[in-house]
Image (cartoon, coloured by chain):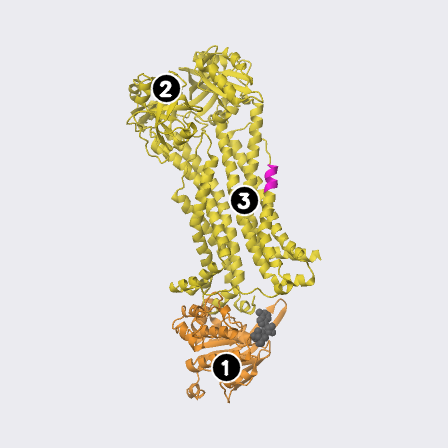
């Protein structure tokens, strides 16, 4: 008995296989994103945790001017501190063959007995011997791009002197998973590398024998990081401590976290859209199937099947679609996770990767997948299965059309009758039209949500390169100096224009609210490096007081008119009280800004310069590079042309793969929705459409009734989808933004246009598939069979 | 009187069927629906097609109307050979020259009576206004009713109005009264009759009701895919005079 019904189930499924597949694929996309992103997240989580643990990644980090090694003993006595590591860190210029401009090297020292915390993992060769002054181990990515194998020689300007070092090995460090050079927007393995050298060598080169300038701590399990940080700051204050911070503000970790937030946001925002659409589709398709089988349902009842048995029969069909969708989603999710983990492993260079699925994501996605199918199917099933046998065996009452004001309005428009047919079809079945509309909108929304990330990035790029940083080169100076340096810089070969820059680390305090940040001074009339808001407009600095980005002002609970304590964390190490005079919207950056005269007046000192912004004559570049390679006062440089090129390349590379994937997924929704809606329309109205052919309408004219309705709904759905997508994108932005990284919110016309076009193309393609069936319809037999 | 007009001149055939055969193949089974039919239909003529179920009436009508193609033989509409026409040409032929009426009305449920007629007049070259067509079948007061709001007879008359509104050269009716009761059927026949009389539209009418043959100019009887009788009607009646 059950056997017969189950055979019918499989036959039903075979009959509507294309529709079932379309639904399963939509469902599968949602589950793929959920499972894939969650598996990737879990892998990253586990990998990072294990990596941090094995490498004894510190919990608290701080930089100071200079303190005797003995201070480490005091630090170790702070309650809650488990381990202390002190070292010397400095920047160096690294001359690499094949690069006209020297790369920036972050030099890190390690004790003769080896580091206690933040242990570098040796990947190749060996670490430099403790007593060698001319040996260095390099971070693997940097060494690899430049082919600096163990034994290779390397010219480095360190401590103002040109030195020749020998590479002994390659390492990876948990502190530099996301290795961002000074002033960079993204990791650049060519232009930034880490140089691990014995303490003796670094101390000698920097005149820091017996001293340290970086301290990191590992805390006991139950220690309160904030208490420890405060105690540490107190101890280090006399030594020029710039304020300790925990992992959340450790650069590499913060970027990794932000990356993971992004993944997690994606897995939160995208899947519900897919699941909802799938539920509606199951409802629509099963509803139609059951409508067609009404007489059979009556028959089954008459024969003695119970309502429950029949309901369960159809529900199984819905669940089968759910199972197929979930299975496909899992498979695709694992495949996606595999690809993404591969990308991350490549990009971030973990020494090892612990692959893991996220079992709870599997359980949740399966539950959701089946629930969605059951919910969508349940409604359709229950409505018709409840009918008494006799009523079910009668054909359903014809849809009742009667004339209302809308019809009079339609008449007044003097539309063609085929257009009237489309309009009436939409108006008489608003529920079904609404599902189609919602489905296509969802498709557009997912596309907008996927593409807008690139708009945000492009906007960031525009504002960073187009408006804020028009200089060709920024030189960081070893130490702030007087304005006379501008003349020296102007005299360098090929320099067309020089502008001063000054930034100093500072702690901003307003009562209990405080924030580690920096104060940047701006000179009037600057044209190269400017302060710009999130629209790329220059921000005019008032003659007095601080100008803060909105986010920072929020954290500090201040606005124009409030006062802030500004503790300068490097010389002159004064504490200033300054008014906040303006707040502005800024995408990236969390520094306080001030007009240079106002800052130096408050400091009662002559203006200082910590970096130089240069506009260059491109033809004289080689001569300038030669000179720069030997300038001891320069601690680092940012080649903005190169940075922009990097940024653009990264964006483009991502663009191609990501856009392809997102477009496919987003279009899948429109395909699933329109294919099913069109298929149902055709099945319900093939009789009517065949009549039109008999009356002398051409294939095209008849297809217009089908294609026109679907495309009209699509066109209405597109603006709705734009609105939905904008809303989702806003949600994504706030989910992705972290303390130190804010994605600017921007959606370009191009994004809206592409999203609309992609959905329209998907809709048109799907309805065309169905149209082919309409074209092949046999007129005579269509007229014979009255449904 | 009414007979005299078309016969006073040499009759011109609208349709000419020559040795038309039609074989349906379903798997290994062959059904020979038409086994060599030769038949002319003349201008202004009304022909009733009779025959047992399965004798091939619908098949023949569909072939004449360009909905189906014969397996063998030739069919001419005036000087055009339909058996040589392409799919698009057949569509154009139906659009310009043929009006169909079917047993199940085949109205578009989402269009009102007027709109169902307008559906055809919008694509015809020289149509009459939809209102006039509906007036002709006695439905001038039902313009804005949807099919579901009309009785079966009214629906069939809308279908006739739709068929004649483009002033077709031929009207092909497959059991137009098949689903109707006697009184309603008479109204429908009246409508067809008046169209034939007033517009001179050549009409082929399939029916199972032998009584109806008396409203025609000619009766053709099919049996087993062959014409077994083809006689003029000598004692024509008005539809209202039929006794059922
Ligand atoms: N599509 C088809 N496939 C196979 N056989 C068919 C098909 N259409 C018609 N036939 C067969 O062709 C023969 C003639 O059919 P047709 O429909 O022309 O008969 P009819 O005279 O119109 O009958 P009725 O009075 O019942 O409508 C019948 O035997 C029928 O079974
Ligand atoms: Mg028939």
Q: Nearer the viewer, residue A568 or B192?
A: A568
The magenta region covers A358-364
Instruction: Give SS at disc 3.
Output: helix
Q: Are marks 3 and 1 in contact (CB under 8 Å)?
A: no
Instruction: Measure the C-alpha gap from mark 3 to mark 1.
Output: 64 Å
Work out whether disc 3 and disc 1 sit on a shared chain: no
Chain letter, colour orange:
B
Instruction: Measure the C-alpha gap from mark 3 to mark 2.
Output: 54 Å
From the image, tell me which residue sits under label 2.
A576
Q: Are marks 1 and 2 in contact (CB under 8 Å)?
A: no
Q: Chain of mark 2?
A: A
Q: Which mark is residue A30?
A: 3
Does label 3 or label 2 sit earlier along the sequence? 3
Q: Position of residue A36 (x, y in %)?
A: 55, 39
Instruction: Give SS at disc 1.
Output: strand
Residue A123: in sight, yes or no? no
**In the rendered image of this protein, which colour is used for chain A?**
yellow
Instruction: Measure the C-alpha gap from mark 1 to mark 2.
Output: 110 Å
Q: Which mark is residue B47?
A: 1
Quadrant where ligand 1 appears:
bottom right
In the image, what residue occupies the spot 46% across and 15% down? A236
């Amino acid at each position: 008995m059950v056997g017969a019904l189950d055979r019918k189930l499989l036959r039903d499924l075979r009959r509507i296989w294309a529709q079932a597949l379309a639904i399963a694929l939509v469902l599968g996309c949602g589950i793929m994103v959920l499972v894939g992103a969650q598996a990737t997240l879990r892998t990253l989580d586990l990998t990072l945790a294990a990596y941090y643990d094995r490498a004894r990644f510190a919990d608290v980090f701080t930089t100071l001017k200079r303190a005797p090694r003995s201070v480490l003993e005091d630090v170790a006595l702070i309650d809650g501190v488990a381990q202390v590591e002190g070292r010397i860190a400095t920047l160096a210029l690294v001359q690499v063959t094949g690069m006209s401009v020297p790369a920036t090297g972050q030099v890190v020292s390690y004790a003769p007995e080896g580091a206690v915390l933040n242990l570098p993992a040796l990947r190749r060769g060996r670490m430099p011997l403790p007593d060698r002054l001319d040996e260095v181990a390099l971070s693997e990515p940097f060494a690899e791009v430049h082919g600096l194998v163990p034994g290779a020689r390397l010219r480095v300007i360190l401590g103002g002197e040109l030195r020749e070092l020998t590479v002994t090995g390659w390492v990876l460090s948990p502190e530099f998973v996301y290795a961002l050079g000074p002033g960079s927007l993204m990791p650049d393995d060519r232009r930034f590398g880490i140089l691990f050298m014995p303490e003796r060598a670094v101390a000698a080169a920097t005149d820091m024998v017996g001293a340290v300038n970086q301290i990191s701590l590992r805390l006991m399990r139950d220690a309160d990081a904030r208490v420890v940080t405060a105690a540490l700051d107190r101890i280090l204050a006399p030594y020029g401590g710039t304020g300790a911070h925990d992992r959340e503000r450790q650069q590499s970790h913060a970027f990794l976290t932000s990356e993971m937030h992004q993944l997690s946001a994606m897995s939160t925002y995208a899947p519900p859209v897919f699941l909802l659409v799938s539920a509606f589709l199951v409802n629509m398709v099963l509803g139609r199937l059951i409508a067609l089988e009404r007489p059979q349902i009556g028959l089954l009842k008459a024969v003695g099947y119970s309502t429950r048995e029949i309901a369960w029969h159809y529900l199984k069909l819905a669940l089968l679609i759910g199972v197929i969708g979930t299975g496909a989603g899992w498979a695709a999710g694992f495949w996606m996770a595999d690809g993404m983990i591969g990308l991350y492993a490549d990009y971030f260079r973990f020494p090892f990767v612990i692959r893991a699925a996220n079992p709870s994501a599997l359980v949740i996605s399966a539950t959701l997948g089946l629930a969605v199918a059951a919910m969508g199917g349940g409604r359709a099933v229950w409505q018709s299965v409840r009918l008494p046998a006799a009523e079910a065996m009668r054909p359903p009452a014809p849809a009742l059309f009667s004339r209302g004001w809308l019809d009079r309005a339609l008449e007044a428009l003097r539309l063609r009758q085929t257009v009237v047919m489309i309009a009436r079809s939409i108006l008489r079945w608003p529920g079904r039209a609404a599902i189609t509309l919602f489905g296509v909108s969802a498709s557009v929304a997912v596309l907008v949500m996927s593409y807008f990330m690139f708009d945000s990035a492009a906007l960031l790029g525009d504002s960073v390169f187009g408006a804020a940083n028009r200089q060709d080169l920024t030189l960081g100076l070893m130490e702030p100096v007087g304005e006379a340096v501008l003349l020296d810089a102007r005299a360098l070969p090929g320099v067309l224009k020089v502008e001063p820059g000054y930034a100093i680390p500072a702690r901003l305090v307003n009562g209990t609210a405080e924030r580690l940040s920096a104060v940047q001074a701006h000179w009037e009339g600057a044209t190269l490096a400017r302060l710009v808001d999130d629209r790329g407009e220059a921000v005019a600095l008032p003659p007095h007081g601080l100008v803060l980005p909105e986010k920072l002002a929020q954290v500090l609970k201040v606005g124009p008119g409030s006062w802030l304590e500004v503790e300068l964390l490097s010389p002159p190490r004064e504490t200033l009280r300054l008014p906040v005079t303006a707040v502005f919207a800024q995408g990236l950056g969390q520094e306080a800004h001030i007009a240079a005269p106002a800052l130096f007046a408050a400091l009662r000192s002559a203006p200082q310069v910590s970096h130089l912004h240069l506009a260059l004559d491109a033809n004289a570049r080689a001569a300038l590079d030669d000179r720069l390679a030997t300038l001891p006062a320069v601690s680092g440089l940012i080649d903005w042309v190169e940075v922009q090129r990097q940024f653009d390349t990264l964006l483009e590379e991502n663009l191609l793969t990501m856009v392809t994937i997102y477009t496919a997924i987003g279009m899948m929704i429109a395909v699933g929705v329109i294919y099913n809606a069109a298929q149902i329309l055709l099945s319900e109205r093939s009789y009517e459409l065949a009549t039109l052919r008999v009356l002398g309408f051409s294939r095209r004219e008849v297809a217009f009734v089908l294609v026109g309705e679907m495309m009209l709904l699509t066109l209405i759905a597109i603006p709705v989808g734009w609105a939905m997508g904008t809303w989702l994108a806003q949600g994504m932005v706030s989910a992705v933004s972290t303390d130190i990284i804010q994605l600017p919110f921007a959606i370009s016309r191009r994004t809206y246009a592409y999203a609309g076009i992609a959905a329209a193309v998907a809709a048109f393609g799907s309805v065309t598939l169905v149209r082919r069936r309409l074209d092949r319809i046999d007129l005579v037999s269509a007229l014979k069979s009255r449904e | 009187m009414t007979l005299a007009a078309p016969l006073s001149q040499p009759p011109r055939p609208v349709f000419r069927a020559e040795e038309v055969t039609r074989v349906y193949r379903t798997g290994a089974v062959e059904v020979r629906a038409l086994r060599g039919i030769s038949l002319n239909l003349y201008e202004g003529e009304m022909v009733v097609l009779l025959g047992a179920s399965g004798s091939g009436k619908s098949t023949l009508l569909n072939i004449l109307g360009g909905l189906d193609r014969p397996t063998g033989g030739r069919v001419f509409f005036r000087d055009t050979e339909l058996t040589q026409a392409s799919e698009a040409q057949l569509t154009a032929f139906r659009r310009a020259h043929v009006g169909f009426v079917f047993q199940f009305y085949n109205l578009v449920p989402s269009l009102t009576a007027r709109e169902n007629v307008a559906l055809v007049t919008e694509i015809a070259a020289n149509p009459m206004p939809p209102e006039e067509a509906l007036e002709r079948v006695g439905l001038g007061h039902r313009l804005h009713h949807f099919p579901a709001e009309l009785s079966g007879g009214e629906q069939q008359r809308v279908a006739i109005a739709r068929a004649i509104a483009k002033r077709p050269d031929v009207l092909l009716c497959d059991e137009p009264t098949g689903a109707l009761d006697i009184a309603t059927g008479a109204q429908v026949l009246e409508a067809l009759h008046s169209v034939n009389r007033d517009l001179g539209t050549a009409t082929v009418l399939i029916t199972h009701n032998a009584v109806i043959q008396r409203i025609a100019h000619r009766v053709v009887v099919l049996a087993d895919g062959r014409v077994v009788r083809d006689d003029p009607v000598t004692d024509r009646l008005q539809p209202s005079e039929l006794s059922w």
